[in-house]
Image (cartoon, rainbow, N blue to C red):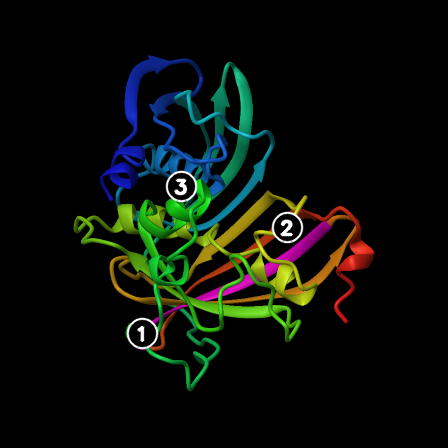
Amino acid sequence: MSGLLAALDLTDTGARTAEDIFTGPSLFMPTGRVFGGQVLAQSLVAAMRTVPEDRAVHSVHGYFLRPGDVELPITFSVDRIHDGRSFSARRTQAYQRGTPILSMIASFQTEDEGLEHQVPMPQGMPDPESLPSAADALRGFDHPIARFWATQRAFDIRHLDAPIYATADPERRPMQAVWMRTIGAMPDEPNLHRAALAYATDYAILEPIMRQHGVAWGAAGLKVASLDHAMWWHRFARVDEWLLYVQESPTATGGRGLATGRIFRRDGALVASVAQEGMVRVPDPRDYDGR
């Protein structure tokens, strides 16, 4: 939790060009690459710092351009693209060594009234308290990535079906659901909860693709990377309370797969929608044909 909060507490350098400049740390990852959800959330925080407090983020569209290095800090430049009567738009570029690693556009809106509807939350889902945590699921695995997932992440992720850390899903279904929340209490700052939710949406989002083709995270030669990420905030939610993240993959082709997700509060309110395309490569796709 301290690492997550430190990462989202960007420093205003005081430097100004045509853009606002901020810096932030990179959190440790056993792969040596910056977690995509981290740089996405930090880019959003940078944009939030330039928008009036009465305008909340409602959408983000970002592209992951290069892998980030966990040994280096990240610089964020924010272009104040537009400020209208009720909407604001910002473009954030994240840099390491002077080279962009992520490019993002975010839109913000003042609170307004209008038409209201949502799809219902899936029924019959087991309670998160009845499900094993990642630490439970990974107990007995002596591997740096397994230890990191089990004990060093800021979010408690609980799969409704058996997780695919080491064993593939025998049912070959392009869908899954997880409960998630931070492992500790968060400050009462709405924008911090919105940014932390963006951070968490990069967890597990590509797993429906892997489930469909019988691929587990431990598969030899597996290469997975987020390519782009889109997110829409519909209603406010605290990320230190349980949220249901329902995910599915409509298609995969050419070494890329698309996954979408919906996030619900425990009271049934639809909080956010997510879409991500990712690279999912295996040594021989014929070994993972979904049979």
Q: Is residue 271 above or below residue 223?
A: below
Residue drawn where x is 35% and y is 23% of the image = 22
The quarter of the displayed image where residue 264 is located: bottom left
x, y percent for residue 209? 64, 60
Prevailing secondary structure of the magenta residues: strand
Secondary structure at numbered mark 3:
helix
Pointer 2 or 1: first along the chain: 1
User: Which numbered circle lies on residue 41?
Assistant: 3
Give the residues in magenta: 256-267
Q: Is residue 20 above or below residue 3?
A: above
Secondary structure at numbered mark 2:
strand
x, y percent for residue 105? 51, 39
**Amino acid beneath label 3:** Ala
Say which residue label 2 marks: 277
125 on left or right of 184: right
Distance of mark 2 from mark 1, alpha carbons?
Answer: 27 Å
